[in-house]
Image: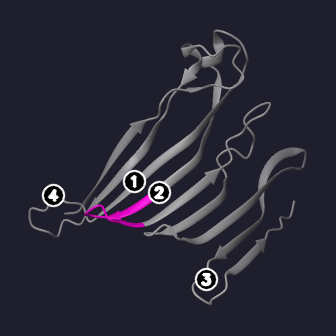
């Protein structure tokens, strides 16, 4: 039968914003999914995957829940990764497509309520040509005196080729509160 294998990788240490000092004790790290390999199980004795998905992350962000030593490294919020690149490859390792995803990670006085929300996604073909771009506009608001985050609107642009112009479409969202 088929199977899926996963490899995880540890990020390098990154600082926790809001700590008084930049000591090694006030840093953290995370593990992330680095590679996913899919095997179809149809090829007799095949040890090669039919597809690989490789992830690269950058812009890790964490913010201290309470400033000061020594609790800073124990009490923090992880805001996620600012950029996640996803590469889809065939079993031989040939790149088929690439996606760059950009996320809100927080900042300022604390980790923003928008942390983890995708605000831009760029899709590329194997040659590195930008094919699609999607923007998502997340808003921090309040409903019934409760803070919440909602998607206000999004725009997707598909790049034209040759004499074909780019095509854009947008969606505005409304919520009943």
Q: Secondary structure at mark 1?
A: strand
Between disc 3 and disc 1, the foreground one is 3
Which of the two discs, 4 and 2, labels the residue nearer the N terminus? 4
Left or right of 74: which side holds 147? right
Which of the two discs, 2 and 1, labels the residue nearer the N terminus? 1
- The spot of residue 93 in percent (x, y) is 29, 61
- Region of the chain picked out in magenta, as a range: 87-96
Which of the two discs, 4 and 1, labels the residue nearer the N terminus? 4
What residue appears at the point 72 percent right and 78 percent down from the top-left corner?
169
Q: Residues within 10 Å of mark 1 (few under 14, many from 20)?
A: some
Q: Which mark is residue 160?
A: 3
Per the model, the C-alpha gap separating discs 2 and 1 is 6 Å
Against 70, is 95 above or below? below
Q: Which mark is residue 47?
A: 4
Q: Magenta stretch mostly in which secondary structure?
A: strand
Against 59, is 101 above or below? below
Write down the residue under mark 1: 54
């Amino acid at each position: 039968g088929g199977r899926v294998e996963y490899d995880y990788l540890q990020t390098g240490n990154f600082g926790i914003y809001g700590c008084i000092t930049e000591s090694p004790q006030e840093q953290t790290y995370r593990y992330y999914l680095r590679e996913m390999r899919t095997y179809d199980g149809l090829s007799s004795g095949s040890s090669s995957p039919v597809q690989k998905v490789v992830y690269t992350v950058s812009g890790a962000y964490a913010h201290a829940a309470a400033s000061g030593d020594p609790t800073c490294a124990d009490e923090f919020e992880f805001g996620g990764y600012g950029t996640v690149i996803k590469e889809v490859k065939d079993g031989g390792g040939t790149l088929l497509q690439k996606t760059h995803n950009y996320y809100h990670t927080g900042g300022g006085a604390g980790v923003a309520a928008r942390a983890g929300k995708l605000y831009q996604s760029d899709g590329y073909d194997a040659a590195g040509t930008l094919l699609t771009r999607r923007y998502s506009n997340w808003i921090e608001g309040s409903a019934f005196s409760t803070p919440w985050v909602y998607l206000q609107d999004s725009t997707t642009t598909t790049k034209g080729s040759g004499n074909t112009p780019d095509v854009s479409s947008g969606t505005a969202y409304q919520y009943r509160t």
